[in-house]
Amino acid sequence: MMSSENHIDSEALSTLKEIMEDDFSLLIETFINDSTERLASLAEELERGDADAVRRSAHSFKGSSSNIGAPLLADLCFVLETRGNEGNLEGMQDHLVKVVDEFNLVKEELAKL
């Protein structure tokens, strides 16, 4: 069941917790650390106007967000990935702010676990 805001898919997270058992907290910690690095990379890539790098970083971030049960974050990353693939990064600095905001909400939810 998803939370009212759909920041975290609690069913997906519950399944992950069952599968990962004792390593679940390490998985969450790794996701948060990797995501923080990906956000910094995305900011730099957007600044440089490197559409292919944005596409690759966003694709990777989308996958890990989906795997951790963060559907809105994955959807926001998909937009970045698509625009990078199209070579059109116009307005994506503002979009990255939405990605960062959603990541912060996801991080807060994961911290409650």
Image: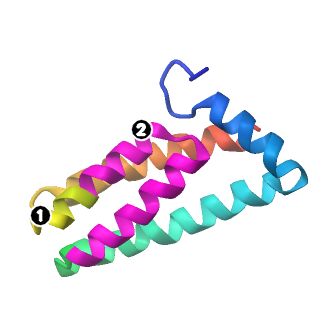
Q: Name the residue under label 1.
A: 86
Left or right: where 86 falls relative to 34: left
> Where's the C terminus, which quadrant?
top right
State which region is magenta.
Answer: 52-80
Magenta region, mostly helix, strand or loop? helix
Q: Does the magenta stretch include residue 66?
A: yes
Instruction: Work out whether residue 41 can be spotted.
Output: yes
Q: Residue 72: horizontal and vertical position, in percent?
A: 41, 38
Q: Looking at the image, which residue sits at the far right?
A: 22
Q: How far apart are marks 2 and 1 (CA)?
A: 21 Å
Q: Could you tell me which secondary element the residue under label 2 belongs to?
A: helix
Q: How crowded is mark 2: few (under 14 residues within 10 Å), some or many (20 or more)?
A: many
Q: How crowded is mark 1: few (under 14 residues within 10 Å), some or many (20 or more)?
A: few
The image quarter in which residue 69 lies: top right
Q: Which amino acid does label 1 sit on?
A: Glu
Left or right: where 17 falls relative to 88: right
Q: Residue 100: horizontal and vertical position, in percent?
A: 41, 53
Mark 2 or mark 1: name the one nearer the start of the chain. 2
Q: Which of marks 2 and 1 is in front?
A: 1
User: What label sits on residue 18 in the rendered view?
Assistant: none
Say which residue appears at 38% left-offset and 70% top-offset: 57
